[in-house]
Image: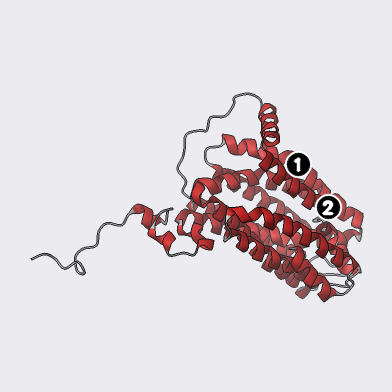
């Protein structure tokens, strides 16, 4: 008599199913928006990135707030942001070369997270000792711009190694959603923490606790990255010539590929002509909107509402519709920024920044 199928021993579990790899039954149980989470390695990768996302978004509030509290100068706000941006122009292409040459790209992320932790801890200690000056924040901005832009190409390349090409677009969109979720929560949390501890009106001491927390989050991200198991592939075939030759070839490839050139050009124009508002937001919030650190943090956070909604929509959207969304979003961004520029009402400004996000 044959065994009853309902009581017979279960068949061995397919490793692909157990690990949640692409093509497993786990994938079929998830909505398309979250399909990359069917991959267990991606879940660890995403969790590791959350510490980085949280720290970066707390810094979006605290660094600009510190500069304006110390100097009261829009000019100094511009210098600080320009310092990190100029360094990033050179660091990003070099980061791409590093991503091409390194076999285990997660080690690049771990090293850069450690460097971020050291920078954050240094600023925290200087606030504790009462020694922090604008020049220290300027130097930190330079190093953070270098580290962040050197890290990003490896992060994107590692995303592909973790999920593969079929789910790459979805995984990138989910990473963006995670970043925007952190943006929605963490600047407001950091601003509320500083305000609750008496920050403002020249008192910058509460900011030290934000930087100590950032240090811990960067270290957590570095440690969790060990759980991301990616096959140690053979070293990729890359030219043995000088790095500058590789950079030149990379720029030539962009110019020969119209789609990539268009996307990079659109992104540059949007950042150059619109997102610079963010650099001046600490001063604008304090002097025009009469907002303290808690309300400044909320302003930064609320812009994450629109960003999160947009990234989730893109994750669920077919590829053919994304170009129209890009153009429509650029138009809406310009209109919302015009309204924000003339608004002197805090809550009207909150609504407009939601659209900007």
**Mark before the other along the chain sequence, 1 or 2:** 1
The C terminus lies in quadrant: bottom right
Q: Mark 1 points at which residue?
A: 89
Q: Where is residue 312 drawn, in percent x and y?
A: 61, 63
* Left or right: 290, with 53 as reference point: right
Q: Where is residue 34 in the image (x, y as percent from the top left)?
A: 52, 62
Q: From the image, tell me which residue sits under label 2.
A: 273
Q: What element carries label 2?
A: helix
Q: In which quarter of the image is the N terminus?
A: bottom left
x%, y% of residue 209?
71, 65
Q: Can residue 136 be seen in this view?
A: no
Name the quadrant containing residue 14: bottom left
Instruction: Kindly state the secondary structure of the residue where label 1 is placed.
Output: helix
Q: Which residue is drawn at 86% across and 55% down?
A: 77
Which residue is at 71% across, 64% downward? 210
Give residue 268's position: percent from left, percent from top: 77, 47
Q: Is residue 158 left or right of residue 331?
A: left
- In the figure, residue 111 lies in which quadrant? top right
Give the vertical position of 10 relative to 192 (above or below).
above
Q: Is residue 38 left or right of residue 260?
A: left
């Amino acid at each position: 008599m044959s065994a009853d199928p309902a009581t017979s021993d279960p068949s061995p579990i397919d490793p692909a199913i157990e690990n949640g790899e692409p093509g497993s039954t786990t994938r079929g149980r998830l909505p398309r928006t979250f399909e990359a989470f069917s991959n267990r390695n991606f879940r660890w990768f995403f969790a590791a990135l959350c510490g980085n996302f949280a720290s970066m978004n707390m810094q979006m509030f605290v660094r600009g707030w510190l500069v304006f509290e110390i100097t009261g100068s829009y000019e100094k706000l511009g210098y600080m942001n320009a310092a990190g941006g100029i360094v990033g122009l050179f660091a990003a292409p070099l980061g791409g070369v590093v991503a091409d040459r390194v076999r285990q790209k997660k080690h690049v992320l771990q090293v850069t997270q450690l460097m971020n932790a050291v920078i954050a801890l240094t600023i925290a200690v200087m606030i504790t000792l009462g020694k922090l000056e604008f020049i220290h924040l300027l130097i930190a901005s330079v190093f953070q711009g270098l580290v962040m832009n050197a890290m990003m190409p490896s992060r994107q390349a590692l995303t592909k190694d973790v999920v593969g090409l079929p789910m790459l677009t979805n995984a990138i969109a989910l990473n963006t959603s995670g970043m925007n979720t952190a943006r929605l929560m963490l600047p407001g949390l950091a601003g509320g923490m500083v305000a609750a501890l008496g920050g403002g009106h020249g008192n910058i001491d509460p900011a030290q606790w934000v930087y100590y927390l950032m240090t811990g989050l960067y270290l957590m991200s570095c440690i969790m990255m060990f759980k991301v198991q990616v096959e140690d592939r053979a070293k990729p075939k890359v030219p043995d010539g000088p790095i500058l030759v590789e950079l030149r070839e990379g720029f030539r490839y962009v110019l020969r590929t119209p789609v990539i050139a268009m996307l990079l050009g659109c992104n540059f124009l949007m950042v150059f002509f619109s997102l610079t508002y963010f650099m001046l937001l600490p001063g604008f919030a304090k002097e025009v909107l009469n907002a303290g650190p808690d309300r400044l943090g909320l302003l930064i956070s609320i812009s994450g509402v629109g960003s999160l909604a947009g990234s989730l929509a893109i994750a669920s959207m077919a590829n053919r519709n994304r170009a129209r969304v890009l153009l429509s979003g650029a138009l809406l961004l310009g209109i919302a920024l015009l309204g924000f520029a003339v608004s002197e009402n805090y809550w009207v400004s909150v609504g407009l920044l939601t659209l900007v996000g």
